[in-house]
Amino acid sequence: MTCRTFLEKSNVYAICITDDPIDNLEYHQELKTSWPVLKVISNFRPDKVMKINTDGFGDYIAKLSSVSGTNIKDYDSLMNALKKRINFYDQMGGKTAEHGLKV
């Protein structure tokens, strides 16, 4: 049984998929096109933005800068880049966010 068959037999009508701000959501769009009765909800999860002490943080910010079309050089430009990505998620049907904070 395929995953899709399982979901159809289970009467699943919506799925919420957690994604990073730099994701392009191309597979979400493919699902929406190939399976129009399924509601695909993108869940915005910006955990990596808050992990400034991890290896690869600078590379991550560079990718965020690229996909958002924003030169990230300070806090305000970082917030602007994130707002642009939130707007993108909204346009793609994403209405939720989750944040994993280590306390």
Image: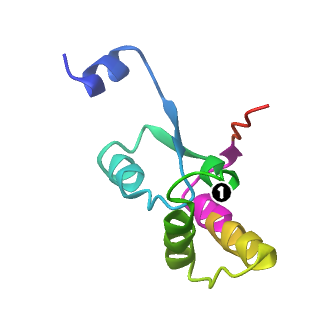
The residue positioned 72% from the left and 68% from the top of the image is 83
Res 37 quadrant in image = top left
Span of residues in magenta:
86-97
Q: Quadrant of the C terminus?
A: top right
Of all residues shown, which one is farthest toward the left? Answer: 1
Asked if the stretch drawn in magenta spans residue 29, the answer is no
Q: Which of 48 and 3 is in front in this view?
A: 48
Q: Position of residue 47 (x, y in %)?
A: 64, 47
The image shows residue 58 at horizontal and vertical percentages of 55, 67
Mark 1, other Cα within 10 Å: few <14 / some 14–19 / many ≥20: some
Residue in the foreground of this view, choosing between 69 and 60: 60
In the image: residue 54, left or right of residue 33: right
Name the colouring of the figure.
rainbow
Q: Answer left or right for 43 relative to 6.
A: right
User: In the rendered view of the protein, which quadrant contains the N terminus?
Assistant: top left
Residue position for label 1: 49
Q: Is residue 72 left or right of residue 64?
A: right
Task: Reply above or below: 80 against 99.
Answer: below
Question: Residue visible at 62% across and 85% down?
Answer: 71
Q: Is mark 1 on a helix, strand or loop?
A: helix
